[in-house]
Image (tube, rainbow, N blue to C red):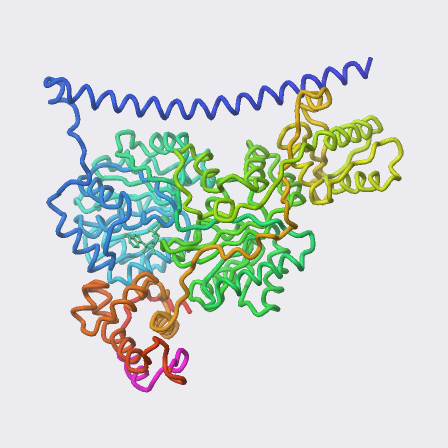
Amino acid sequence: MEDDILAELLNVEEELEEVQGQIRVLISRQDKLYEKQSELKALLEACQGSESPSNAKVSAPVENWAGSFEWDKEVDDIRFNVFGISEYRVNQCEIINAVMSGRDVLVIMAAGGGKSLCYQLPAILRNGVALVVSPLLSLIQDQVMGLSALGIPASMLTSNTSKEDEKMIYKALEKGEGELKILYVTPEKISKSKRFMSKLEKCHHAGRLSLISIDEAHCCSQWGHDFRPDYKNLSILKTQFPSVPMIALTATATQRVQTDLMEMLHISKCVKFVSTVNRPNLFYEVREKSSAAKVVIDEVTDFICGSYPNKESGIVYCFTRKECEQVAKELRERGILADHYHADMDANERERVHLRWSNNRIQVIVGTVAFGMGINKPDVRFVIHHSLSKSMETYYQESGRAGRDGLPADCLLFFRPGDVPRQSSMVFYENSGLQNLYDIVRFCQSKRSCRRNAFFHHFGEPLQDCNGMCDNCAHPTETKEVDASTQAKIIVSLLKEMQENDQRATMLQLVDKLKVNSRGSGGATPTIPDLKREELEQLIVQLVLDRVLKEEFQHTAYSTNAYVTIGPLWKQLVQGKKMVKLEISVNSRGSRTNIKAVKCKHLAGLELKLDDFRKELSSCHGGIFPHAVLSTQQISTLSTERPDSLEQLEKLIGKTKTEKYGERILDCIRQYVETEVPNGSVKEGDSIQHRPTKRAKTKKALINIDTSEDEQC
Ligand SMILES: Nc1ncnc2c1ncn2[C@@H]1O[C@H](COP(=O)(O)OP(=O)(O)OP(=O)(O)O)[C@@H](O)[C@H]1O
Ligand SMILES: [Mg+2]
């Protein structure tokens, strides 16, 4: 009797799981259909508007945001002379025009795509003060510091703001005193400070609230990956200031999140700009991870030292806090300047590590996911995942912290099937947590499919060319597809037998058992042919992905254990209706470990000297990051063009930076040119990267850098 009930219960559970899987597929299909529906409706409206002359009067004018506008000249002037940007990136110009026209705008643009310019530039040009809501203190500090360095009057109102500064800001809002153009606040200010809201009201009343920008807007939505409850209250802004244009920006938002954002922020009539998720400058690579910790650290070290001998910045993501500390320590022992970052450290210590890294004093931060959204460093050249992320979306975000300056960068993920249960026991209680994890595991297990295409699939975008910028496209491994159905059946029968005896096994225990059996001491279970330990692990994970097996979880006092048991589709396998194929590398593990991933142009000659120059300036004066003095692209342009007058320099980097650093940059270039010998190198002893000449020293005292008041170094 009990057995019958149990059997029926199992059947019901299997069917439930099946149905849940179908629901997930249907929901995602529904999302795509909604998207298509709104596209078609918009298209239909546009067609009807252009066909019928009577409709033409009532329909909205065709919006050509790339056209000419009365502010074109001023916008161009600020873009180049203040921001030092010579060309717009995709959609930037159109977004700026839409905001300048007073429209509400929703911007979906990949990490590092250049969203900040889209509100900062209109903020300078429009009358009054722009309000920017941003979720993190560190992000706000970075932005205010960067703007101050460009001579743009920007401030922040946060829990750290002194009473005196607060007074000044309130005066600027209330009475228009001072020069304030951009004010950054955290969302709590909007939801919790009545005083602030009343000052803002006065500012608006006097016609001085120029625009409202909601950065990292995905935090509004429960469906986004970083939901912040305080972002929910931002709806008040549009209700209270309906005539002020609002711009909401985020790097990733599925259709569902976009709809949610527009509803929550009350910007249903906004102009939407969606750019591709593609980051063409990132090289994606997944490597097989050794089970020996030391081997992994050696590989990480070889990669960093081999690919980035000039100590370009990078991030290593680890799974646990302890692992972070250990990996950082071992990297230091191997001569890499690294430090750890995780949620167990106190806020000051975290801030200190972050700043040292931002100022290029340490090369590598080894962090948990806690090292997240606040990272604004544009010249991160590599992001290494020592362990698996929990979803494709998280991996896209984390790896996307590389190459925000648009220059080539590496995203390297070390994967071994044994890491799957570590993650699954953390995420199984989250909504779709396991499903999301299995998506990224599929991405990692694949030895043939384009990594970039996996992102396009995931974010529902049409495919684009990878241009050889992932391991599978650049250096296909020789793989063979083996039929592992026999081995799979053995695994299922072993698990059934264990289940009948009330036993269970983690993935590693299961592999051990199978290996013992294969050595012939396994009792009744048949032996498992031909698979190495790593391949067996790969097969078990593959079977979980194929739902022949499933993971089950049990809490203990200290942790949650993940066990492998038979899954909903085991019968299909046993009845021969399902084949299990396994992709196996023909060459041994690590056959691709010597890929030189991106063709990273190493700084040399004059570039190196200008790089030292910007570091020196930032470390001497504090309060400014090296990339705010000169971007890596500007360094590259200067070393090619080698300007020798302020006029020439201004044409390359704009007025503001020329006024601030022009003489010094020219000095640096002249010194280099004088010491250069014909083959492009520098005379021995003259390279002086860390030995400023007397002249440079004298000049240093004359430089005046406008920065925020904080001494950041
Ligand atoms: N048109 C451009 N040309 C060259 N560099 C640009 C341009 N626009 C922005 N940048 C630079 O690109 C880098 C990233 O820009 P920004 O911080 O605005 O990215 P973002 O889209 O906000 O990214 P995230 O989602 O990570 O916050 C910055 O260093 C910025 O100065
Ligand atoms: Mg940003």
Q: Which residues are magenta?
A: 687-702
Using residue 596 as the reference point, say whether residue 134 is left or right of it: left
Left-right relation of 187 to 78: right
Front position in the image: 120 or 84: 84
Report the side of 26 relative to 563 (left or right). Answer: left
Q: Quadrant of the N terminus?
A: top right
Residue 57 belongs to the span the image colors magenta:
no
The answer to which quarter of the image holds residue 560 is: top right
* Residue at screen point 58% across, 35% down: 438
599 or 66: nearer the eye?
599
User: Residue at 15% of width from left, 19% of height from top?
Assistant: 51
Residue drawn at x 69%, y 26% is: 567
Name above or below for residue 495 compared with residue 216. Answer: above
Q: Nearer the viewer, residue 319 or 66?
A: 66
Point out residue 470 in the picture as x, y percentages from the top left corner: 48, 47
Q: Is residue 450 above or below residue 375?
A: above
**Residue 706 x, y percent position in the rendering:** 28, 68
Q: Quadrant of residue 647?
A: bottom left
